[in-house]
Structures are given as C-alpha cells and as structure tokens.
Image: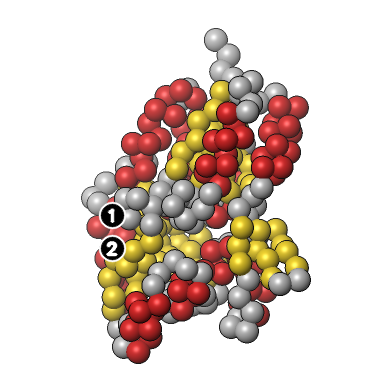
Amino acid sequence: MIEKKTAILVDSGCDVPQSFLERYPIRVLPLRVSYEAESHVDSVELAAEVYRRFPQEIPHTSTPVMQDFYTVLEQLRAEGYENILGVFISGNLSSTCQTAKLVLEEHPEFHSFVLDTRNISIGAGLLAMWAAVQLENGVSFEEVCRRLPEKVADAKVFFYMDTLEYLRKGGRIGAVTSVVGSLLKIKPIISCDEAGIYYTVEKIRGAKAGVSKLLEHAAAKAGSGPSWLALMHGGAPETMAQVKPKLIETIKKGTILAEGQITASLAVHTGPGLLGIGVLANP
C-alpha cells in the first residue's frame, strides 16, 4: 500500500528552523505584524526592524486569515497532497488553530488533523519537527496523529526575559505584575502552562542567575534520557552564543536542532534581550 502524501502546516509563531522547512514538507502560514500605516508578513528578518522601532512604536500582531489557508491548500492539492497535519501555537494565545479547524472542515477532500500544541515558539515547533521526522521514518499519518497529542506534555520552551513591559502592553500579563517586576528589577522566566497560557516559572534578579535557572528548568524538563533542544534569542545573539556550550554541558543527552532569532511576531510581545531554551523530551 502506497502511503498518501502528507503536508504539515505550521504558523510562523512556531519558529520552525529553515533547515527543517527545506528538508521536510512543512508549509508556513505567516502571522502579520502591523503598524499604524503599514502591515508586514511575519519573519525572522522583520524582527530587527521591530527592535529598531521600539519603544516608540509597538506594532500589533494578527493571525493568518482564511484566504491564506485557502491559498496554501490549493497549492497542496495541486502538488498531490492528500493528508494535512496542522501544528499551531497555543489556541489560548492565537486563533490560528481554530481558523485551521474551520477551514479544513470545509475541505473534506483532505484527511486532516489539527493539533493545539498549547505552546509558543519553538515549544510548538519541536512538535511539528517531531511529526516530520516520524513521517519520514515511515510512521503512518494515522499513527502520528494518534501519538502527537501525547507528545504535547513532553514539549516546553522557557524564556528568560529582560522585561515584562512588552507582555503587559500586548495584554498577555497584568499591569500590576509588570510594574512590580520593574520596580524590584526582577527578571522572569516565562513559559506556557498546561492550558497554553503564559505563566511565570520563576522570578530572579540578575542575568547570571537568570541563565543558570533557565538551564536548570530546561534540564529538569529534558530528564535523564535523550532530548531535542532549541536555543533561541530575541535580539541577543551574543548571549545565545555564550550559553550554547553551557547548554551542551548541562544536558549531555540533548541534541540541538534549532538555534537563532525568534520571529518578529513573538518579538513584539517579548521585547529585546530574550533568551529561550526549547525542549522535547523522549523524541
């Protein structure tokens, strides 16, 4: 029996690295980053412009529209794809996941499955990457769809952030938390909880302690077995480079599959000076 062709759809907020996009049938639906008089398609390259215009200009972000989905589905149909696997950032942080479900219900010619990763950035991206590797290794579409929801609990991304101000301005956290954090010079480590909502993992003072705690939380998530890792930054490439050898030393059975700048849509809500570690345990 010939396995039907499967395409994986992700949104740009998943931060799937270019190396995976080039090797596997993964298609990206870009979010939008909009200023008062202009709108841009989300990308890693756009992040530099977002940082440059901070703090005077803070854009807003929006999800892919239905027409974006229709366009990519038409392309996939023309290329002979019959299975669609959608892997998107948390439905409690974005409506992309729900839009995908609605659109795919209108296209019964595809066998489809949509996963709410309850994650953000590479925490979601690692799940799409895992699915791509499974499919390439011969695991059936149906089996990957069955196992993916079980893998959600194994995926996590931890962000050490320089400020809570941009999360506050984007409505992701309360004003009181942001103000108190600023007054006390507290640097938070942020992640997504089981519902896919931002929460503060730990509050620390000082960059050195922040990096140490970030590595500690990542190592706890990775456990003692093999893991996939991702090292991400938000306008802080030097910091990422300094932390990389520490990550390799701390999580000895980990394999770094992605590293680099987060996409612009996430940069809008987190501000500059961010360092993130993504973990997928037991890949």
Q: Residue furthest top?
A: 1
Residue 92 in picture, x, y percent from top left: 44, 52
Residue toward you, 54 or 102: 102
The number of discs equals 2
Measure how far apart labels 2 and 1 are at the Cα level. 6 Å
Residue toward you, 133 or 81: 81
* Mark 1 Cα shell of 10 Å, populated few (<14), some (14-19), many (≥20): many
At x 29%, y 66%, the residue is 201
* Mark 2 Cα shell of 10 Å, populated few (<14), some (14-19), many (≥20): some
Q: Is residue 178 visible?
A: yes
Vertical comparison of 96 with 230: above or below: above
At label 2, the amino acid type is His
Residue 42 in picture, x, y percent from top left: 65, 59
At label 1, the amino acid type is Lys
Q: Are marks 2 and 1 in contact (CB under 8 Å)?
A: yes
Q: Residue 161 falls in which quadrant of the image?
A: bottom left
Pointer 1 residue: 221
Q: Is residue 111 left or right of residue 48?
A: left
Question: Can you tell which mark lies on residue 86?
Answer: none
At x 51%, y 69%, the residue is 170
Residue 80 in picture, x, y percent from top left: 70, 24
Vertical comparison of 222 with 169: above or below: above
At x 45%, y 62%, the residue is 231
Vertical comparison of 201 with 222: above or below: below
Q: Secondary structure at mark 1?
A: helix
Residue 57 in picture, x, y percent from top left: 64, 79
At x 34%, y 64%, the residue is 199
Q: Secondary structure at mark 2?
A: helix
Residue toward you, 88 or 283: 88
Pointer 2 residue: 217
